[in-house]
Image: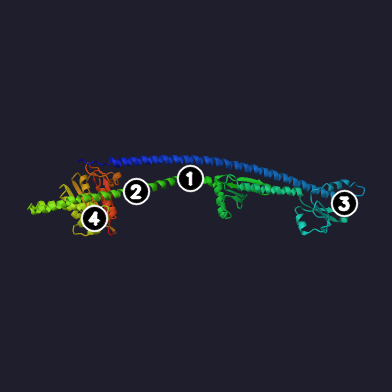
Amino acid sequence: MKQPVFSRYSIYNRKRHWKLLLLLFAIVIISFSLWYSSVLVKKIARDERMKIHTWANALQTRARLVNSTQKFFTQIQEEERKKVELYAEALKRFAKAGQNEDQGFYLKIIENNTSIPVILTDSKGNITGTRNTVFSSDTVPGMKEYIKKEFSKYPRIEIPYYKNEVNYIYYNDSKLFTEMQGVMNNLVNSFFSEVVNNSASVPVLVTDSLQTQALTYGQIDTLHIHDSAYLQKIIHDMSAENEPIEIKIAGQGKRLIFYKDSYVLTQLRYFPYIQLAIISIFLLVAYMLFSTARRSEQNQVWAGLAKETAHQLGTPLSSMIAWVDYLEMKDIDSETIEELRKDVNRLSTITDRFSKIGSNPSLIPENLVSVIYNSVSYLKTRTSQKINYIINVSPEQSIVLPLNLQLFEWVIENLVKNAVDAMTRQGTIKIDIFEEDHVVNIDIADTGKGLPRNMYRTIFNPGYTSKQRGWGLGLSLSKRIISEYHKGKIFVKSSAIGKGTTFRIVLKKSV
């Protein structure tokens, strides 16, 4: 019955095509996901930028309102100062008016002051009169320290009096103006508070005109903001994103408002990349789990198949051994009996090899050189006479390694048989053995047709073969024996089309 052929143009070729298709499909899905995420991020960023610009424009408008209000208060303050000066002038004129001079006009000016607190004192500091204050000259006859401090906001006005006497007028802002000034201060404070606690939730920093002091801030690390180096870094980063807003508040000088994109927007900018990383990690973990499960399943199939094969071979092998013994007693030609016995022993060795697959075979110290010479000696009689075998070490040399003899001989036989087939039963097989510090390298080279580089790994896959006959299990079994049982390595060291291939086996001197 003709065996099915698992060529490189069938199973593994289709497998590569499926991998490429799946990879292309994954790239399409990931690209679409990243593109859509990027579109959403850009839309959110655009909306947030609009909010930030609206917020910045509102700041400018609010600042103009604050400045206009402050200007209005300054005008009121100036008007009150003029009223006090007029009040003082009326007192001067009233004090100097003669008996025949009309004093009603001056009295009317003095009486019309119903809002500005005024204190009149003599040259010794005694209070001689008050107007619009909570105290009078009767309750507080002298200028107390707290009163003097309260009424020292503006310079006192000197009033010449009778016979070179001098009186003084102390005055303060009116109650109405003081209340309005409080409202103004609250307005300025609320302005900066709203700047910091903005609805756009953007990091904000308000500094003086020299950019050396953080006056107020929001959405910024409070632990390091007073560190000058950190402050300058924040200012530099914010300036790189947006031009600072310059605000001039009357009475407080110029202020600079720095701001940048919110942390949410910054995180959204990196979201597609984070998403790509998460997807990649998920796919990698899924692939590793799938590969592990597939490898475990393959191992179970290998072990089950090998043990079942050994079991099936056991019964006819026992019968064949008995037949050889029987034929030997019948005076059959001894040379024929010897050849039959060799083949029966060979079958016994093969059965033993299969029985060890799937178990944990023991490794015992063996002379590697002798093992290779024995394997080659056996194969010489069963391959073409046109095959030339070269081994670079003498048979007397000894290199002792922990080996499982039956399984390792199987590897050598598989590699040599593949080399013979690659050379179409004519050429040279060269085996080089050389030691390093902790390992021994075995190179098996042929002069066959060679391999393309993209097949260096594929040839070790179960079922791969380029031959018309065979199941493509030899190299796969060899790799399993070397890597799993001997903890070594086997790989294609080099190959050239039309010139040949070199396989390398790396074995540890101690396992």
Q: Outermost residue, right direction?
A: 100
Q: Which residue corresponds to mark 3?
A: 95
Tag in front: 1 or 2: 2
The residues bearing labels 1 and 4 have C-alpha atoms spaced at a distance of 55 Å
1 or 4: tag closer to the N-terminus? 1
Measuring from the top left, give residue 310's x and y in whole percent. 22, 51
Q: Is residue 23 left or right of residue 70?
A: left
Category of crowding for the residue at label 4, using alpha-carbon neighbours closer than 10 angstroms: few (below 14), some (14–19), many (at least 20): some
Q: Which residue is drawn at the image coordinates 51% and 46% (left, top)?
A: 267
Question: What numbered label is drawn on residue 271?
Answer: 1
Please tell me how many numbered marks the rendered image carries. Answer: 4
Question: What numbered label is drawn on residue 293?
Answer: 2
Q: Nearer the viewer, residue 97 or 401?
A: 401
Q: Which residue corresponds to mark 4?
A: 433
Q: Is residue 280 left or right of residue 488?
A: right
Q: Which residue is drawn at the image coordinates 57% and 54% (left, top)?
A: 222
Measuring from the top left, give residue 28's x and y in whole percent. 41, 39
> Tag 3: residue type?
Ala
Tag in front: 1 or 4: 1
> Tag 1: residue type?
Phe
Which quarter of the figure is the N terminus placed in?
A: top left
Category of crowding for the residue at label 1, using alpha-carbon neighbours closer than 10 angstroms: few (below 14), some (14–19), many (at least 20): some
Q: How is the image coloured?
A: rainbow
Measuring from the top left, give residue 170's x and y in whole percent. 79, 53
Q: Nearer the viewer, residue 65 or 44?
A: 44
Q: Secondary structure at mark 4?
A: strand
Q: Which residue is drawn at the image coordinates 72% and 48% (left, top)?
A: 181
The residues bearing labels 3 and 1 have C-alpha atoms spaced at a distance of 83 Å
